[in-house]
Amino acid sequence: MTDAVRDRDVVRAPLGRGDLPALVLASTGPDPLPWDTALAAVLGYARGRRPLRFRTPDDPQGRWFSVLAFGYERFDRQPVADGPLGDADVLVAEGLHGRLGPTRWAAVRATLDDVRPLAEAAVARAAGRACWELPAEEFSVLAEPGTVGAALREVWQRSQDADHLRPDLVSAALHHRFPTLVPHVDRTTRRQLWPHVVEGDSGVEAVVHRELRDNAAAFAVLETAVAAMLADSAGRAGPSLTRLRLHDVLLWLSGSLRLAHAVALGRATEEWRRYEVGGVH
């Protein structure tokens, strides 16, 4: 039975909460991540809010406002740009990692031009397949040159070598443009992934690929459940959180010590209350 068939059957079968598989992600910690915890964390990332006090000229004492706690609306829900990598991709990366001054903005923009052939080569090599659908050889140095993993390693290296540049902004821009193929890796998640690189891996992306493959059933159900829960009131789904992005969100929340907070926010949502009543279908 292929992974695709197995994942499809898991998603279609109604599941009770006790049937849901835990995610075994060494990059997030030594213990398996219960499926319910992962779902609550993602809901907290997407829907969670925090209090922030603003003072304005007409209200010098200030007022409390409830603002989004994480980057879902500013990054994940932004439309994917058409055409060559460019200004729109830098803007969406800013939505996740913060505003840039003119010098750093220009550095990200120039680096996207520099790595564009590498990104296009990775897309061509994948031939329409998602990261988790690629064979392990695509992330092994033994199969180089020309692999997806080799291209992604070179993208990171060029981003590191550029002046006035944070490589995570380039990674964010490329992930948003190619959300099923290019993992988003920043300084926090790279530190989490690096200890799990093994001999022969082309880079930290190989760890992401392994964890997605090893947890295919759990991520398939999580991906489908999240898409349904984050649909609008008319049932129309917004931009999806692919399992590649879900892995990154869970890894970042764990590595930045925000997981417990995101879980608490998620369990306070209306979507969670409906889930507790109806389960996953």
Image (cartoon, rainbow, N blue to C red):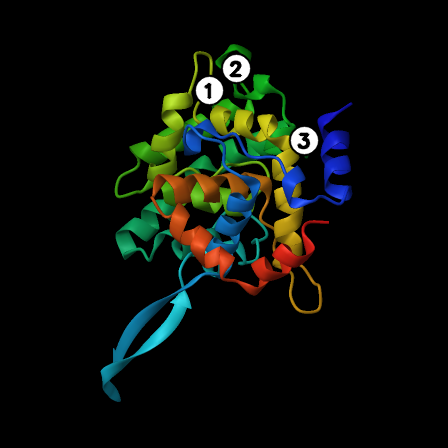
Q: Amino acid at mark 1?
A: Ser
- Picture coordinates of residue 129, whole percent (x, y): 67, 32
Single out the residue that lies furthest toward the left: 60
Q: Quadrant of residue 192?
A: top left
In terms of depth relative to the viewer, which is nearer, 56 or 29? 29
- Is residue 128 toward the left or the right of residue 187 in the image? right
- Is residue 280 toward the left or the right of residue 99 in the image? right
| Between marks 2 and 1 in the image, the one whose residue lies nearer the viewer | 1
In terms of depth relative to the viewer, which is nearer, 162 or 175? 175
In terms of depth relative to the viewer, which is nearer, 232 or 25? 25
Q: Provide the residue designation for mark 1.
A: 202
Q: Residues within 10 Å of mark 2 (few under 14, many from 20)?
A: some
The mark nearer the N terminus, 1 or 3, is: 3
Q: Is residue 17 above or below residue 267?
A: above
Badge 3 element: loop
Q: Are marks 2 and 1 in contact (CB under 8 Å)?
A: yes
Q: Provide the residue designation for mark 2.
A: 144
Tell me the quadrant of the picture where the N terminus can be found: top right
Q: Amino acid at mark 3?
A: Ala
Q: Provide the residue designation for mark 3.
A: 127
Spatial CA distance of label 3 from label 2 is 17 Å
Q: Is residue 154 above or below residue 101?
A: above
- Picture coordinates of residue 16, whole percent (x, y): 69, 44
Badge 1 element: loop
The mark nearer the N terminus, 3 or 2, is: 3
Single out the residue that lies furthest toward the bottom: 58
In terms of depth relative to the viewer, which is nearer, 59 or 264? 264
- Picture coordinates of residue 19, whole percent (x, y): 67, 38
